[in-house]
Image (tube, helix red, strand yellow):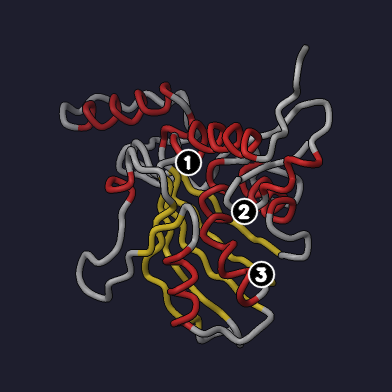
Amino acid sequence: MPLVVPEVNPDALKRMKRNIIANPNCSTIQMVVALKPLHDLFTLKRVVVSTYQAVSGAGKDGMDELFAQTRGSFVNDPPKIEQFQKQIAFNCIPQIDRFMDDGATKEEWKMAVETRKILDPDVSVIATCVRVPVFIGHSEAVVAEFAEPVDLARAREALREADGVILRDEREDGGYVTPIECVGEDASYVSRLRVDPTVPNGLAFWCVSDNLRKGAALNAVQIAETMIALDLLPRHG
């Protein structure tokens, strides 16, 4: 079944079978939206990504657990741990979903597999996915290695013009977007864009997005809108 992010691979909708389309993982969506214009310019080879994922990715119960643990910490109530593997309030948990045989979690596996399916099967991806005490908004620190020489000015221009991306990269205190600032917004926000000097053709950047919008509901709506635009809806009568 096609995994579709309309800003990245809308043509996959034309290969739909049995009228079923899948929404990708929320952390994958925001990353590939940011990587697509860079891949078009420089040909992506490898991605190293660390995610900082909000508790809303685990649903309402995850949000309730963070709230209860945070409130309880001020009155010395012992934390009640049900939705996550450890206390989430004032903590970071380097596990999302179950562990696979190779030591990766299923969330990390999904990011690698989905990125290759959506963006390019030749791209290598290693992810470390971490649950953090944030209610809404996933953050990602991305290091990307390309096949062709990287030009920072061209990368900035491509990100500024890309659908679904907003570049805010001011090299000053506060000149970047944090997860609380992206709540209720549609875009993948890219900040801290810089050359990675440790590899021949590397870029590093920070990316945040509302995981409940672009990571879920909005992407589904955009898929439907793209199907209408491409005249792919089944006709009856």
Q: Which is closer to the viewer, label 1 or label 3?
A: 1
| N-terminal label among 1 and 3 | 3
* For residue 165, above or below residue 24: below
Q: Residue at x 76, y 46 (%)?
A: 101
Q: Residue furthest left?
A: 75
The disc label shown at residue 8, or none = 2
The C terminus lies in quadrant? top right
* For residue 136, above or below residue 68: below
Residue 13 screen position, x and y as percent: 73, 40
Question: Which amino acid does the dot numbered 1 rest on?
Answer: Lys
Q: Are marks 3 and 2 in contact (CB under 8 Å)?
A: no
The answer to whether 169 appears left or right of 214 in the picture is: left
Alpha-carbon span between mark 1 and mark 3: 24 Å
Residue 116 screen position, x and y as percent: 72, 56
Instruction: Count residues near mark 2 (Cα–Cα under 10 Å), then give few for <14, some for 14-19, many for 20+.
Output: some
- List the residue tagged with mark 3: 46
Instruction: Count residues near mark 3 (Cα–Cα under 10 Å), then give few for <14, some for 14-19, many for 20+.
Output: some
* For residue 6, above or below residue 221: below
Residue nearer the viewer, 16 or 209: 16
Instruction: Count residues near mark 1 (Cα–Cα under 10 Å), then give few for <14, some for 14-19, many for 20+.
Output: many
Q: Which is closer to the viewer, label 2 or label 1?
A: 2
- List the residue tagged with mark 1: 214
